[in-house]
Image (cartoon, grey):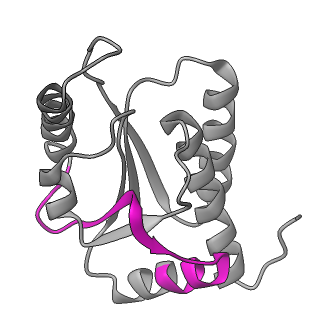
Amino acid sequence: MKVTVIGVGKLKEKYWRDAIDEYSKRLGRYVKLEVIEVADEKAPETLSPAQEEQVKKSEGGRILKNIRDKDYVIALAIDGKSLSSEEFSAFVSDRMNLGEADMVFVIGGSLGLSADVLKRADFKLSFSKMTFPHQMMRVILLEQFYRAVKIMKNEPYHK
């Protein structure tokens, strides 16, 4: 199965890239992983609601260009469903066992995801009611995906 993570913005800091590389290496034993970065929209700090929607729409268009019709899309969203690590593992296992579609996880930029991306999503997943930097969220997602696979395979994972 192929797993794709689409994130808005480029990881500039070496420590984030190193963490992504580490979890990508670990996951390589279990899935084919691709991490895609789409450009974030350059915008001033203060935006009107209409400008915020335009930024999300532009970023959303870039995201959607990387999603195929057959992909199973999981959008990371604050208002999504929260799962424990064990529940997330069962969710991933169910998706893998169905084998009908590749999984695509989508992480929005600083303003979140556009309505079009959320509409395309097959599932909305929340890691917390808190807001996290999108760079950090990539690492958290890959760590939790790795943990899910280890749980699924009944393999030990250092806590």
Q: Could you tell me how many numbered marks the image carries?
A: 0
Image coords of residue 9 (percent x, y): 38, 27
What residue is drawn where x is 61% and y is 19%? 13
Instruction: Quadrant for residue 65, please give it.
Output: top left
Q: Quadrant of the N terminus?
A: bottom left
Q: Is residue 140 visible?
A: yes
What residue is drawn where x is 21% and y is 30%? 52
Q: Is residue 129 left or right of residue 73?
A: right
Magenta-highlighted residues: 67-91
Image coords of residue 58 (percent x, y): 14, 31
Q: Is residue 4 left or right of residue 66?
A: right
Q: In the figure, 153 relative to 141: above or below?
A: below
Image coords of residue 7 (percent x, y): 38, 39
What residue is drawn where x is 18% and y is 32%? 49
Most distant residue in the right direction: 158
Q: Is residue 1 visible?
A: no
Residue 8 located within the stretch drawn in magenta: no
Q: In the figure, 52 relative to 60: above or below?
A: above
Q: Is residue 46 left or right of residue 71?
A: right
- Depth order, front residue of 122/111: 111
Q: In the figure, 52 relative to 115: above or below?
A: above
Q: Is residue 10 left or right of residue 142?
A: left
Instruction: Quadrant for residue 14, please give it.
Output: top right
Q: In the figure, 154 relative to 146: above or below?
A: below
- Depth order, front residue of 25/108: 108
Q: Quadrant of the C terminus?
A: bottom right
Image coords of residue 126 (percent x, y): 47, 64
What residue is drawn where x is 33% and y is 36%? 111
